[in-house]
Amino acid sequence: MSIHQNLLGGPAPTHLPDEPGREAITAGTPAVEVAAAHPTSSLAWAVLADEAFAAGSTVESYAYARTGYHRGLDALRRAGWKGHGPVPWEHEPNRGFLRALHALARAAEAIGEKEEYERCTTFLRDSSPTAADTLSA
């Protein structure tokens, strides 16, 4: 079996490298400061999306989430991801991307973008059932 396959014959899980700014977010640095200093940080954009959504700023949440999602896709591709396969929640550096993907689904649903909501929800569950369950709770 190739090291690039899992036990079921699919692609191996993708494990992103630690993302810039994760420690700053964890230490309580405002996400807006982290995103400005580390614009490639999916986690910073995901936190901004969560904050905007909680404040009732759905369109802003959608924009922040989309930015984090695309930054995460870039990082996944650099890590060898080929467009599908597991992105485990259990690997902490993956959580920024997964949170941004969840935030994008949530905001898409809130603005009535049904196809985007369904696509992102399916993508999240396919990438990490644990993330889908954890973030939907």
Image (tube, rainbow, N blue to C red):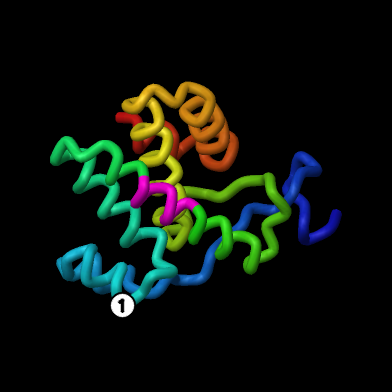
Q: Position of residue 4 (x, y in %)?
A: 77, 58
Magenta region, mostly helix, strand or loop? helix
The number of numbered badges drawn on the structure is 1
Q: Is residue 50 above or below residue 117?
A: below
Q: Amino acid at mark 1?
A: Ala
Q: Nearer the viewer, residue 1 or 13?
A: 13
Q: Is residue 114 above or below residue 129?
A: above
Quadrant, the N terminus: bottom right
Q: Nearer the viewer, residue 39 or 95?
A: 39
Q: Is residue 10 above or below residue 96?
A: above
In the picture, residue 104 is in which quadrant? top left
Instruction: Give the residue at mark 1.
Output: 37
Q: Position of residue 95 (x, y in %)?
A: 41, 54
Magenta-highlighted residues: 63-69
Q: Position of residue 97 (x, y in %)?
A: 46, 53
In the picture, residue 37 is in which quadrant? bottom left
What residue sits 20% from the left and 48% below the top?
A: 51
What residue sits 44% from the left and 69% below the top?
A: 40
Q: Name the element at disc 1.
A: helix
Q: Nearer the viewer, residue 84 or 68?
A: 68
